[in-house]
């Protein structure tokens, strides 16, 4: 982890050196640093996000058949598992692919948190109503925005409909959004700002890129 944090820290510092060549206002400079830094990382991770989207679409498509298998073999768990594995194999779907992709991305997300949390310049630089990016937002505006952007981001990727799975994910999205608001109350404003920027970029990717791919994949399955 230290190695990854070191690489990302050097990368962020390089971006900061470039930005401050053209921007003298440090408050604006650090904001632009975070935007550029997060946008580049999100772009690098985009192929993983696309792959995960395709996998989720296939899993949603298989849900009716999976429920049929569960109902048919509810008294024979071993046969049920065999039929489920057979269905996954025939459809070319890996039910664990979404988890594997998350595991790949998680170390990068954690490392980025440490990079942002330890930026020395945040100790003396504020942003808009925040006195210092290294301290928490005493007006709690950033935590609330973080919850709203988290909810909107989750809303865009959550399955639609009134089935139990969709309702459960919709509830989880709401709970997670509230959790982030509460959790970020005493977090460094720079970290919360990074999370907001990350959510906004993810929302833009979802709207302009992922949705188009999603529609194409769904059309193939019809």
Image (spheres, rainbow, N blue to C red):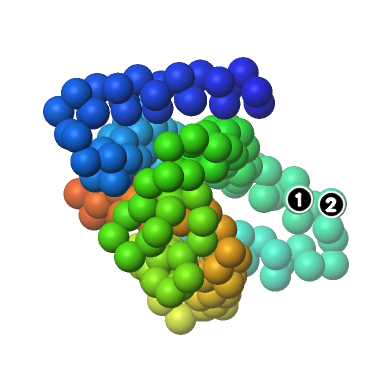
Identify the element where label 2 is drawn: helix
Would residue 171 be found to the left or right of residue 49 on screen?
right
Seen from the viewer's position, the closer of residues 33 and 67 is: 33
CB-based contact (under 8 Å), mark 2 and mark 1: yes
Q: Residue furthest front?
A: 124
Instruction: Please tell me the numbered disc located at residue 14.
Output: none
On the question of residue 91 being in view, the answer is no
Residue ID for mark 1: 81
Tell me which corner region of the image, top left, top right, bottom left or bottom right, holds residue 10: top left
Residue ID for mark 2: 78
Circle 1 packing at 10 Å, graded few (<14), some (14-19), many (20+), is some
Residue 222 in percent (x, y) is at: 30, 55
Would residue 179 be found to the left or right of residue 45 on screen?
right
Tell me which corner region of the image, top left, top right, bottom left or bottom right, holds residue 180: bottom right
Circle 2 packing at 10 Å, graded few (<14), some (14-19), many (20+), is few
Residue 51 in percent (x, y) is at: 42, 37
Is residue 137 depicted above or below 114 in this figure? below
């Amino acid at each position: 982890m230290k190695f990854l944090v070191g690489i990302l820290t050097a990368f962020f510092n390089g971006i900061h050196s470039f930005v401050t060549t053209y921007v003298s206002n440090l408050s604006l400079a650090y904001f632009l640093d975070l935007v550029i830094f997060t946008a580049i990382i999100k772009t690098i991770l985009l192929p993983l996000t696309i792959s995960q989207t395709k996998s989720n679409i296939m899993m949603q498509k298989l849900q009716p058949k999976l429920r049929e298998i569960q109902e048919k073999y509810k008294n024979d768990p071993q046969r049920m598992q065999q039929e489920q594995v057979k269905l996954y194999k025939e459809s070319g779907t890996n039910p664990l692919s979404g988890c594997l992709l998350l595991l790949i991305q998680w170390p990068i997300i954690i490392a980025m948190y440490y990079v942002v949390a330890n930026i020395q310049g945040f100790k003396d630089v504020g942003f808009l109503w925040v006195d210092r990016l290294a301290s928490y937002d005493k007006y709690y505006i950033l935590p609330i925005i973080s919850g709203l952007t988290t909810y909107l981001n989750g809303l865009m990727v959550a399955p639609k409909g009134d089935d139990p799975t969709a309702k459960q994910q919709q509830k989880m999205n709401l709970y997670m959004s509230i959790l982030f608001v509460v959790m970020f109350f005493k977090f460094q404003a720079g970290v919360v700002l990074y999370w907001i920027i990350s959510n906004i970029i993810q929302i833009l990717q979802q709207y302009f890129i992922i949705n188009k791919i999603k529609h194409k994949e769904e059309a193939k399955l019809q």
